[in-house]
Amino acid sequence: MKKYFLLFLLLIIPVSVADVSIVAPAVAETDYGYVGAPVNIDVKVSKGNGHIFMDTMPMTQLDMQGSARIAAKVAFDICGKNQKDYDIYYVVRSDVPVIGGPSAGATLCVATIASLNNWSINKNVMMTGMINPDGSIGPVGGILEKMKAAKSMNVDYFLIPSGERYVKADLNEADNNTVDAVEYGKSLGIKVIEVKSIYDAVYYFTNHKIIERNYEPNPIIKNIYDNKMENLSNKVLKQTKNNYNYVENRLNYEYKYNTRINYDLKKELDTKLKTSKTNMELANSLYINKSYYAATSKAFGALITLESINTTLNYIDSDDGKDYLKKYLLSVQNELDNEKILINNKNLSKNNIEYIIASKSRIYESEELIDNAWKEYYNNKPLSAIEYGAYAKLRGKSAIWWLNLNDNNNYNKNGNKNIENELINESDLKYLAQEYLDNSEIVVLYSSMVLPTALTNDAMKNLDDAKKYYNQKEYLLSISKSIDAYVYATTSLNYMEDTDYLKKLAEKKINLAENYDDGCIPVSALGYYEYANTFNDKMSKILYYKYSIAYAQMNIDVLNELNGNISKVVEYDESSTFTEDSPINNNIETSTNAKYNITLNMAFLALGLSCGVFAGYLLGRRNRDDE
């Protein structure tokens, strides 16, 4: 009997880090329309095996599970802890059925960070916002309704995503009248504050500052990247110039002697040649400015156009144009098949993951393009078939460019060649691919409901592709397509995003990736960052900065997944203590309570150890007596 009693004592000894309660605003759908409603959330983090448990009641429509996973991941990354060593419990309660989804993600992340650090939550603050995997806070709907819910809880501070100060007046109405959320908050007696990242939000909730550790750019890695991209850019530019001169001379000849070229076709071909020249000249200018990735991209566009012009001339010159086109598409198909075999036979390692992803995504895109070419061919649209076929051919070539970009050039972050290049199995990335797929799905579904645009349509297609490749066990491709889906979806939401903030965030992520132990060169992140800097329009900058951030984060996530633990390099540095001049100091339990929680946990731990020792002594004594 004593044995069972002692075992019972051991079972009830708590092993949690800390319990945190927080209130999030939500939107409930009633007979009278949409109204704000408070949601009570309890967060508990305990030693475990990396599981996330969610208990919601009642919740309808969008599931919060995906948002909770992102919130937990960001919290553990920031705090420098290995999520696989813990279990997280989210208990969500509301008096009315509310619309779930990602809008409570930032709040969940703050609560998780507070739990991991034994910090108390300021009850005088509420927040709405989606948490992104990079730690930024994304836009949500129903801000005014949620502010009313905050007022009912006597909240003085309400945090909203940056860029959402001016919002739709009423979710129940179809008009586009907007309201200044800051002024509306004043009318309710609430101070509304825009926040860009979870780092900003944590301070308002806890009076603790998490200092982002800023890493300097790694000049060695930047030099390696520049050399790789300069060589590739130089090669592609030379090819473009040669092809342009050939096609220009051929066109001049054909216009003089080929009677099959009518006025409309000549006009179309002239326009294409002019476009290719513009792209080639822009590529030269970018190359001179050392924007090698952007130069390669523009030269690549020119190559596609020139291939299309030359193939069109071959088609026109042929006595049997349909037969020629069929043979052309078959030759492209054969080239793609051989290139795909070459890529699939490439051994995967930590040092070439970036290049394999880039080459695989391009070769699979080329297969879609050649499929479209055949469709146009059988629909008797030869010129359209040529367009798709030319694009497919060059996209396949670019896949090999990226594959060869890493050959005999495996370097570590110190600039030394990696003699031992550890091979890995793609199946090792299955869990990460599932995580990326889940994260992108919650954002894509949300964006398609809130602000459906052409970008969200692209996001949906990429999400479908990510699922398809995951089921085919093509986990690298699934991750790549999940990134595409996520970037398009968040770009459609963040149409008023601060590009300067995104640029700085991309720099931080790249620098962090470059300083990881055993880190690979984040070529995609560096390339997209460089490409974003070449654009003048805001939307393109947003899109490619987001790509840069996403691929830098992918490098970090892949290394963590393969290493089995979190790297020594983490974003979390230190927290400030409570200060009297903090912007918020009402209704908050000071750091003394946090220290009390730590002391209490230590007491429980000591008690547990004592009970264990005592139990072992009694059981050992009983066994000796039985003998």
Image (cartoon, rainbow, N blue to C red):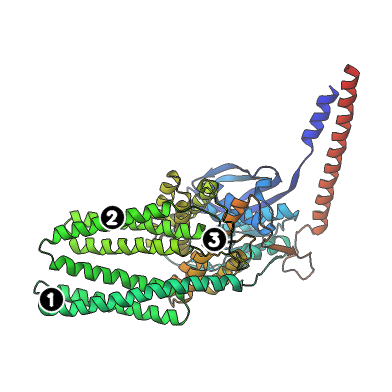
Mark 3 → mark 1, Cα distance in angstroms: 58 Å
Sequence-first disc among 2 and 3: 3
Q: Which residue is mark 3?
A: 143
User: Which is more toward the observer, 109 or 98?
Assistant: 109
Q: Position of residue 432 (x, y in %)?
A: 54, 50
Q: Nearer the viewer, mark 3 or mark 1?
A: 1
The label on residue 327 is none
Residue 286 image-quadrant placement? bottom left
Mark 2 → mark 3, Cα distance in angstroms: 52 Å
Q: Position of residue 424 (x, y in %)?
A: 54, 50
Category of crowding for the residue at label 2, using alpha-carbon neighbours closer than 10 angstroms: few (below 14), some (14–19), many (at least 20): many
The kind of residue on which mark 1 rests is: Tyr
User: Which is more toward the observer, 41 or 461?
Assistant: 461
The kind of residue on which mark 2 rests is: Gln
Q: Position of residue 406 (x, y in %)?
A: 49, 63
Category of crowding for the residue at label 1, using alpha-carbon neighbours closer than 10 angstroms: few (below 14), some (14–19), many (at least 20): few
Q: Is residue 293 visible?
A: no
Mark 1 → mark 2, Cα distance in angstroms: 32 Å
Q: Is residue 245 visible?
A: yes
Sequence-first disc among 3 and 1: 3
Sequence-first disc among 1 and 2: 1
Q: Which residue is mark 2?
A: 333
The label on residue 263 is 1
